[in-house]
Amino acid sequence: MHRSCFFLLLSALLILPDHGLSADHPNILWITSEDNGPQLGCYGDKYAVTPSLDALAAKGMRYTNAISCAPVCAPARTTIISGIFPPSTGAEHMRSMVPYPAGLRMYPQHLKDAGYYCTNNSKEDYNLTKPGTVWDESSPKAHYQNRPAGSPFFAIFNSTISHESQIRNAINDKDRIHDPAKAPIPAYHPDTPEVRKDWAQYYDRVTMMDFISGKQLAELEKAGIEEDTIIFYYGDHGSGMPRSKRWPYNSGLNVPLLVYFPEKWKHLAPQDYTPGGVSQRLVSFVDLAPTLLSLAGQEIPSTMQGKAFAGPQKTPDPKYVYGFRGRMDERYDLVRTVRGSRYIYLRQYMPHRIYGQHVDYMFQTPTTRVWETLFKEGKLNEVQSLFWKTKPSEELYDLETDPYEVHNLAGSPEHRMVLEEMRQAQQTWAREIKDVGFLPEDEIHTRSGEGSPYDMGHDPKRYDFEAVFAAANLATSQKSADLPAIVALLESPDSAVRYWGVTGLLVHGPAGLESGRAALIKAADSDPSGSVRAVSAEVLGRYGNQDETARALEILVDLADQTKHSVPVSLLAANAIDYLGDRARAAQDRILGLPMKPAGKAERIDGYVGRVILTLREKAGVATPAQPAKAKRPKAK
């Protein structure tokens, strides 16, 4: 080629616009928001004002059966970043921190192999340690505009304006556009001014989130790369209102999911993709990472537990998707959910705990407080009262006829086959992923040693899943005929099986104590597992005679000292003390003086025992030391 022609060609190439993509890789933009379900105009909500996202739905496609897997942010985001269910990685608890599975990587690391510039703006909140450098940039300044020339980008912009905390704080008058008198109130909430105000402000915040999303979409268009970019929008779980956030009902799991494929990349879209269309496919957050890799032309690792719903590696539509609930801040719980196109099934593995346990952060919302007050005053109807009562072992709801999930069909003869099939699906799923959530939290860590809970869970020498899972199902059946078999669990050499044995006796209350008194006394005094001792002592403390209660208190106060025991064991014990109520009064001074922080490092969970102690101080009417007024709460994200 003549030298002058070469330089002319080179000059022409240099002045061409940089669309930020290689020949075979689309740009991918995720716009995400916090604590909002599908309360958008495009989903048929007439109270919602969301013009920007409605416009995106009109030119893209919306999913009506998308779920977040977890009804709270940290485990939900942990699901996304790994493509693995947190009950499999040991990362289900809110909040926690466990090692990443050995040899595995987070999805941005796979995208970077394909040449992507990956940015996150900016929330991470993972319950897993990061295996090396994950993002090219993750900060409030992260932006695809900073990418190297010629690189395709993957970018996340996350809005926090609809977060739970924004429901109950001050809001400018100009942003108050929803009339509380017209707010839709779900059947399980009481219809009070406080509840109406909270729901109206939630919708106000969703409108503000929509405005932010619109600015991000306009920025993409202004940059001239809209038609080169695949766009996703989704919320991270259900609304921040109580019984949505934190609860693996459809109200807590169902999220809005909008996708847009420009003409250039429509060959990567799902087969049912049409502009303005609707997909009924069941999609969950565990599917997002595999879908990204499919769109980017990267092989999906076999260790990822989700299924791609777009791109060349798209899989057939699943029959079910799955959800879960573990510890929520300072309160323990264990729920597993199966969601189909019509029905949702919940298996409660701690049915002895009420739905509305006192999670401090949730109780800062006025709706929660007035709801509990009206229950205590006997002013709620049966449906509204359920949240403040203990739970059945199984729940089944027809989402077509009962969208608020308040009429439990688990006992319906007409739905027996549906119940049995979904029960089996839950058990099969637990086996497939090696659900380590059936271990007490302390043992998730101790059995893993320096390694990851995922690797421990796949090692039958360290985790006999079948034995532990069978014990959990037996212990929480709530069938009195199972009591002899539950007592027998306390003879197991496996501490997790013994843990479920004492939990089963706690579930049965006074009858459990009478059936297993001698075994409970022995376990409370001398079991090598602090978790077994804590639950045994709770049974004796709540239902035992005076001497048994006194001994149980001694054990629980000792275990609740987190300078001597692990935070999870101390948290179990502190919760047990709280549930003893007036039976713990004899040790009140010692209880209220318990250490607020652990002696060593306990990443992300070091404030939760202290929260229970603050709650106990408030119940006792005792001010926190150095606090002349009401105790200041640890801040939650």
Image: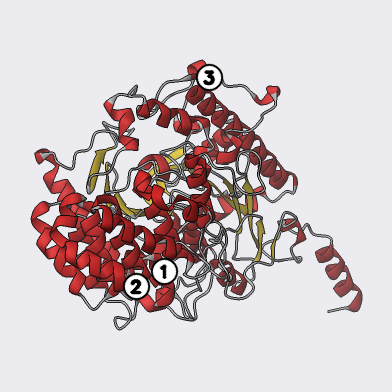
Q: Amino acid at mark 1?
A: Asp
Q: CA distance from mark 2 to mark 3?
A: 51 Å
Tell which residue pokes out farthest to the right in this image.
Answer: 4
Mark number displayed over residue 442: 1
- Whether residue 207 is visible to the viewer of this picture, yes or no, is yes
Q: Is residue 384 left or right of residue 311?
A: left
Q: Residue 486 falls in which quadrant of the image?
A: bottom left
Secondary element under disc 2, as helix, strand or loop, is: loop
Of badges 1 and 2, the one in the foreground is: 2
Q: Amino acid at mark 2?
A: Ser
Residue 145 in the image, given as x and y percentages of width and height:
75, 56
Secondary element under disc 3, as helix, strand or loop, is: helix
The quadrant in which the N terminus is found is bottom right
Residue 81 in the image, given as x and y percentages of width and height:
52, 63
Q: Nearer the viewer, residue 272 or 631?
A: 631
Residue 239 in the image, given as x and y percentages of width and height:
48, 38
Q: Nearer the viewer, residue 237 or 169?
A: 169
Mark number displayed over residue 180: 3
Evaluate if marks 2 and 3 touch, with contact meaning CB atoms under 8 Å apart.
no
Q: Is residue 416 left or right of residue 454?
A: left
> Label 2 belongs to which residue?
529
Label 2 Cα neighbours within 10 Å, binned few <14 / some 14-19 / many ≥20: some
Image height check: is 437 above or below 458?
Answer: above
Evaluate if marks 1 and 2 touch, with contact meaning CB atoms under 8 Å apart.
yes
